[in-house]
Image (cartoon, rainbow, N blue to C red):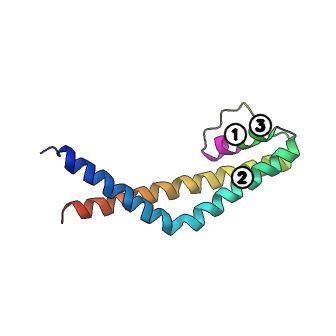
Amino acid sequence: MPLSKQQSTQLRRRFFIAFADQLRVVWPIISGILLIMVGSGLVIWRIEGWRLDEALYFTFVTGLTIGYGDFSPTHLSARLLALVIGFSGIVLTGLVAAVSVQALNATGRGSWE
């Protein structure tokens, strides 16, 4: 049986509330990972001599494992930092997925009560 518009809205609201609750739990970890990523990007900015926006763009494209290839570090130390950014991005993506699954589980439990 399909959900009514009101039920659908309530489920969506429960999900976002549960998502925010779960996010508060792991926020110190997520903020630490973001700090590592941005810090590494800023070091790469200094090493490679890119503009700041290019370095931050590179950081998040690499961290989200998209990797367009329009910017690539040439110095060994910058390449090693790019690896740190990439692995940090994988962990960050996993955390966001885990938080989403927990929120979905909490929403599902709440809808059957």
**SS for callout 2:** helix
Identify the residue under disc 3.
Answer: 72
Looking at the image, residue 86 sits to the left or right of residue 94; the answer is right
Q: Which residues are magenta?
A: 57-65
Q: What residue do we see at 46% from left, 54% from top?
A: 97
Identify the residue under disc 1.
Answer: 57
Q: What's the distance in space between the residues labelled 2 and 1, CA to CA?
A: 10 Å
Q: Are marks 3 and 1 in contact (CB under 8 Å)?
A: no
Nearer to us in this view, 21 or 80: 21
For the residues carrying marks 2 and 3, which lies nearer the camera in this image? 2
Looking at the image, residue 56 sits to the left or right of residue 100; the answer is right
Whichever of callouts 3 and 1 sits on the residue coming sooner in the sequence is 1
Q: What's the distance in space between the residues labelled 3 and 1, CA to CA?
A: 11 Å
For the residues carrying marks 3 and 1, which lies nearer the camera in this image? 1
Task: Residue type at mark 2: give it.
Answer: Val
Identify the residue under disc 2.
Answer: 38
Viewport quadrant of the C terminus: bottom left
Task: Residue type at mark 1: give it.
Answer: Tyr
Q: What residue do we see at 70% from left, 58% from top?
A: 36
Q: Main secondary structure of the magenta part?
A: helix
Residue 96, position as x, y percentages in the image? 49, 55
